[in-house]
Amino acid sequence: MSDVHSDLPTLDQVLSRKTLPPVCLYNFYIVMRDRLKMEEVLDFYLDLQHHELLWKKYVKAMHRTGHLSETDLSEGFQSPRLLSRLSQHPPTLDEKIPSRKDLSDSAQRLILRYLVPSATKEVTQLPIELRKMLCKELEKEENARDDPLLFAEAKNYVFEYMQRFAYPKFLRLKVWGNVTLYQQMGRLVLGLVSLFAALTTSLSFIFLGYPQWGTRFWILLPFWIGIYNLLTFFTGLDPLWVLLFNKSETTTFKFNSIKQPQVKRILISRSIWLLTIGIIISIICTIIFCAIPPHRL
């Protein structure tokens, strides 16, 4: 996949909101929640991003108010020098500026929501030792840390976890397909019913003595509907939704327009191929049943 479609968006681009539907953060969250059942991993990562943003705002505010110098910021927002300077807990003068208490509260929310046993969204994918270490650091009565550097290992771990176990499946669903699981199940039922109707109609024409070709050629329609829907079930791709409407399904019968150029190109190519295969199979089935001589019972 990396060789043929190396220009596809990366996980980092998706998480940074630099991509377009259907490979956007919104759709990634829906897939994590509805298909992979691990939305807590993504929620944890996004809340860590928010905590980092809060930290950067705090550091910039301390710089503007004169508590930090250019030298303090020269090594980055999470350097040991900067952490040492901010350990003195300088006061915040403006209510609009994040305070150290805001940072501490944000860190505590991360513990209670994701790290402690039986948390509402416990991230069980994190190693137990790492979760215990974070809880221990954040529960200290004195010198408790709330800087993003404390969570760096956990953030890297969940990113790699999503990169390995979630993102390839997300690409498979959104780059090579455009329908949801429930839609696929519905297409399976519709496809089987249509094929059954095609077969019964074909046999009825034969045993009622209808001549070859002519009227009997109308069985092409139920054959095509049945095969089209079965191909949609097996591939997760509805070609007409792509070619006629440029749509990708997010949740059942709710759609995004396909805007990511690389994804659009792949879906159009696959849709043309799938539609052609479906038409060819339908025509072959129709010819076979139309060629059978009539045999009136």
Image: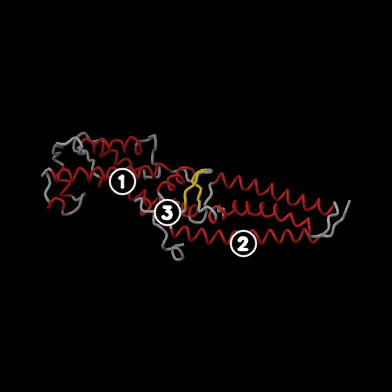
Q: Amino acid at mark 1?
A: Gln
Label 2: few (<14), some (14–19) or many (≥20) C-alpha neighbours in 10 Å: few
Q: Are marks 3 and 1 in contact (CB under 8 Å)?
A: no
Callout 3: SS: helix
Q: Amino acid at mark 3?
A: Arg
Relative to 274, 208 lies left or right = right
- 122, above or below 244, in the image: above
Label placed on residue 49:
1
Q: Earlier in the sequence, mark 3 or mark 1?
A: 1
Residue designated by label 2:
276
Residue at coordinates 14% horizontally, 45% vertically from top-left?
64
Whole-number angstrom distance, CA of label 3 to CA of label 1: 20 Å
Residue at coordinates 85% horizontally, 51% vertically from top-left?
208
Q: Position of residue 256 (x, y in %)?
A: 47, 48
Q: Position of residue 160 (x, y in %)?
A: 37, 52
Q: Are marks 3 and 2 in contact (CB under 8 Å)?
A: no
